[in-house]
Amino acid sequence: GQNIDQPTEMTATEGAIVQINCTYQTSGFNGLFWYQQHAGEAPTFLSYNVLDGLEEKGRFSSFLSRSKGYSYLLLKELQMKDSASYLCAVRDGGQGFSFIFGKGTRLLVKP
Amino acid sequence: GAVVSQHPSRVICKSGTSVKIECRSLDFQATTMFWYRQFPKQSLMLMATSNEGSKATYEQGVEKDKFLINHASLTLSTLTVTSAHPEDSSFYICSARLNEQFFGPGTRLTVL
């Protein structure tokens, strides 16, 4: 079956670093994506991994291990505006290239 | 990045009426668009994959006669919620695929 797991909620302090983990079991794999979603808004793209390793993009980094079915999103120098839900999504390798989304991790950044 | 628009952003309608939501890719052509529904505090749930010039592919449990999808051009897909009921109240989001998915801003539907 298709399954993506990520923690439901996390809390961190402004200025700190937080790591949001995602594990997946999917029938196909053609990339792993992280999205940020503020309440009441559509998701926005953060990062994309298709090969193993770390992708860095400013304050955000994402890591992928395909053999372990594991990814994490690392947020550095947390800001209050980073309080949002973070969605892990896997693109399957089927013809339609549809995305399977995790349930999201609600991150609360406290002063 | 690529831009996807949705219209309307909010709609309130009476039970039993139909509502049409438009999704447009503004600066690229999208042969495939996706329609999602998101209930409060839940993740995105894929409803259907919209393919230009052919019938949409619906996910299990989504009624194709209730949620009509038309992808008549490479830049426009429409979702029509027919005979809407209060339980259809949700946040509807479309996306279009380039190398990654680009999401529209979403449409909040409230059915009274």
Image: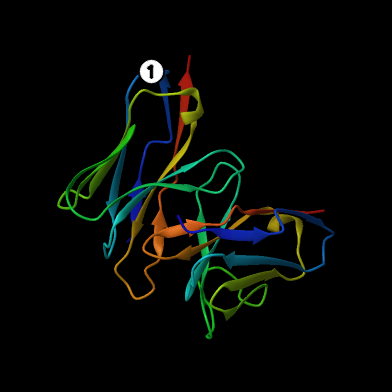
Identify the coloring: rainbow
Look at 14% across and 52% down and name the residue there: A67
Q: Which quadrant of the figure has residue B62?
A: bottom right
Residue extending furthest toward the left: A67
- Rendered location of residue A14, percent (x, y): 42, 18
**Residue B24 falls left or right of residue B34:** right
| Quarter location, residue A21 | top left
Judged from this view, the residue extending furthest toward the top is A111
Instruction: Find disc 1 in the rendering and name its residue.
Output: A15
For the question of whether residue A47 can be seen, the reply is yes
Residue B59 shows in this picture: no
Left/right of residue B97 with respect to residue A5 in the rendered view: right
State the residue at coordinates (46%, 30%).
A82
Please identify the residue farthest to the bottom as the structure is shown.
Answer: B53
Instruction: Classify 10 Å Cα crowding around label 1: few (below 14), some (14-19), many (20 and above).
Output: some
Pinpoint residue A91: horizontal percent, then vertical percent: 34, 61
Q: Quadrant of the N terminus of chain B?
A: bottom left
Mark 1 lies on a secondary structure that is loop
Pick whichever, B48 or B16, lies toward us.
B48
Residue A94: percent from left, percent from top: 32, 72
Chain letter for mark 1, please: A
- Answer with left or right where residue B16 lies relative to residue B10: right
Question: Which residue is at a point 23% across and 45% down the rendered structure image?
Answer: A70
The one nearer the camera, A58 or A94, is A58
Instruction: State left or right for residue A50 relative to residue B92.
Output: left
